[in-house]
Image (cartoon, rainbow, N blue to C red):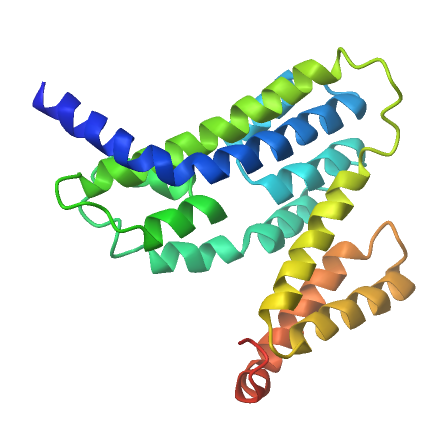
């Protein structure tokens, strides 16, 4: 009974922090589910992918991967590049996950941008178990995404109007991410590097094969130019 009380208290403390995530995840998740259905996949695909992958950007990209020719190496590199930021999230959470027992395995698996932001910055009340608080933040956020994408997959099969062009939602999502990063930066060196690398690789490799070379170029350039950019305040 005492353990149930601890878990319930942690759930009550965690839930309010996830309400803004609920609104965003349900909308974007349903869009993803409809997009999957319009691409020819049943609702089981967004359900399974949202449970096992649980990476919004990667899941959108995975649709085109599933429809393309079999290319395991390119798929692996693409997934690694898109989700590489989680390496830094994980390093930041090493101390916070100490002493979590079995819960740390799920916390590592389920850590997305939003869960990381809440668990890293939230002021957890002293009478609330820290491990269970982080666990419920992560679980609730994943449930929002899983249910949203599954509902989208189900609703997509009922939609009778033409959904041609809905795949543009992925382009729009990345444009918004780019604009948010642009607004955060005082100087836009990293954005210019990304744009230049993308345009150059598009011209060299073509529209079907430019994405992975672009991400490799961006990674190499940012690594090589890191100190000059930091000195100039380009990451601020």
Residue 138 position within the rendered picture, expressed as x and y whole percent measured from the top left: 38, 37
Res. 115 in view: yes
Picture coordinates of residue 108, whole percent (x, y): 37, 43
Horizontally, is 125 left or right of 191 in the view?
A: left
| Corner quadrant of residue 8 | top left
User: Is residue 53 at all visible to an observer of this figure?
Assistant: no
Residue 17, quarter of the rendered image: top left
Q: From the viewer's perspective, is residue 45 above or below residue 64?
A: above
Name, please, the residue furthest toward the left: 2
Q: Position of residue 121 (x, y in %)?
A: 34, 55
Residue visible at 64% across and 79% down?
A: 187
Horizontal side, residue 97 vs residue 71: left or right: left
Question: In the depicted view, which residue is nearer to us: 197 or 175?
Answer: 175
Residue at 73% x, 54% y is 175
Whether residue 148 is situated above or below residue 170 in the rendered picture: above
Tag count in the figure? Answer: 0
Question: Looking at the picture, does residue 107 appear above or below residue 157?
Answer: below
233 to 182, vertically: above or below: below
The residue depicted at 74 percent of the width and 20 percent of the height is 41
What residue is rendered at 63% in x and 60% in y?
180
Q: Is residue 14 left or right of residue 23?
A: left
The quarter of the image holding the N terminus is top left
Measured as percent of width and height from the top left, residue 25 is found at 55, 34
Quadrant hosting residue 3? top left
32 left or right, relative to 134 = right
């Amino acid at each position: 009974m005492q353990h149930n009380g601890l878990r319930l208290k942690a759930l009550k403390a965690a839930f309010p922090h996830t309400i803004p995530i609920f609104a965003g995840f349900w909308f974007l998740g349903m869009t993803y589910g409809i997009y999957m259905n319009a691409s020819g996949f049943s609702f089981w695909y967004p359900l399974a992918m949202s449970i096992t992958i649980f990476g919004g950007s990667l899941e959108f990209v995975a649709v085109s991967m599933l429809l393309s020719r079999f290319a395991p190496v390119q798929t692996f590199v693409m997934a690694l590049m898109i989700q590489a930021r989680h390496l830094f999230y994980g390093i930041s959470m090493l101390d916070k996950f100490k002493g979590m027992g079995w819960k740390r395995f799920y916390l590592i698996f389920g850590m997305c941008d939003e869960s990381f932001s809440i668990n890293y910055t939230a002021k957890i009340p002293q009478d609330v178990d820290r491990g269970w608080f982080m666990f419920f933040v992560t679980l609730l956020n994943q449930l929002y995404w899983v249910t949203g994408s599954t509902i989208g997959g189900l609703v997509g099969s009922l939609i009778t109007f033409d959904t041609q062009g809905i795949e543009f939602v992925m382009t729009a999502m990345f444009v918004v991410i780019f604009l948010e990063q642009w607004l955060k930066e005082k100087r836009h060196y990293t954005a210019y590097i990304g744009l230049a690398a993308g345009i150059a690789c598009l011209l060299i490799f073509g529209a079907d094969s430019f994405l992975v070379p672009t991400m490799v170029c961006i990674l190499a350039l940012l690594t090589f130019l890191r100190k000059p950019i930091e000195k100039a305040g380009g990451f601020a």
